[in-house]
Amino acid sequence: MIEVRWHARGGQGGFTAARLLGLAASVFGNNYAQAFPSFGPERRGAPVLGFTRIDNKPITDHSQVYICDCVVVIDETLMETVDVTKGLKDGGKILINTRLNPDSFKFKGNFKVITVDATTIAMEELGAPIANTAMLGAFAAVHDFIDLDSILQAVDKGMSESLRQTNKKAIEHAYKVIRGVE
């Protein structure tokens, strides 16, 4: 099983990205998946978590994800107050939306850090600093268990028609940046 924890602030689409990944993995990737948020009565801008579980067999665990394979940080300012490595498996991946390069981050533990400037990509493709789908594209680029086509199909099924094309462009743009195509 692959377990992913998404760190964002309310209103940044962290749960939307978690949900789209689950949709891509299950409906279009022939796997089983769960996606769910964790937040209380916090207001817009407060830290929130999203989770995605993916497996090739039915998933019976419905608890919060405590131990994960990958952490996605949509808002790097969260790292000032949140230990994003808590529960991340040895050798796990941390994907961070930032202008900084991976060597700028010094985490205690054996983790692979990947960075992408998803906010700039979002501004270019969406005209707004909503980086969740760009981070989803970056996620697809660093993991072999989900392919880009499945993510794009999930956007077609899981987002309103008015948002699909620009978000698919953000996904493809970030995917290409991570893969070194752009």
Image: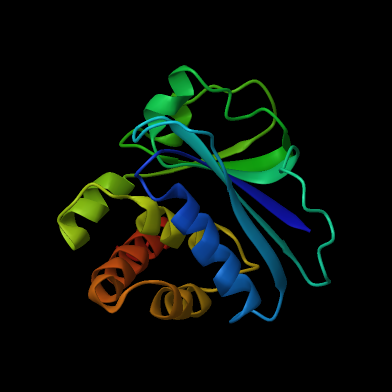
Q: How is the image coloured?
A: rainbow
Task: In the rendered view, tell whether residue 49 sits above or below residue 174.
Answer: above
Q: Nearer the viewer, residue 30 or 41?
A: 41
Q: Position of residue 96 (x, y in %)?
A: 45, 40
Q: Residue at x 37, y 71 (%)?
A: 159
Task: Indicate whether 43 appears above or below 138.
Answer: above
Location of residue 12 in the rendering, given as x and y in whole percent from the top left corner: 35, 45
The x and y percentages for residue 65 are 72, 43
From the viewer's perspective, tell me whether residue 145 is left or right of residue 75.
right
The spot of residue 15 in percent (x, y) is: 49, 52
Residue 65 position (above or below residue 28): above
The residue lying furthest to the top in this view is 81
Of residue 46 and residue 93, the one placed in the foreground of this image is 46
Question: Quadrant where the C terminus lies?
Answer: bottom left
Residue 90 relative to residue 166: left or right: right
Which residue is drawn at the image coordinates 65% and 20% (left, top)?
A: 108
Quarter of the figure that contains the N terminus:
bottom right
Q: Residue at x 41, y 42 (%)?
A: 74
In the depicted structure, whether residue 138 falls above or below residue 108: below
Residue 35 horizontal side relative to residue 77, left or right? right
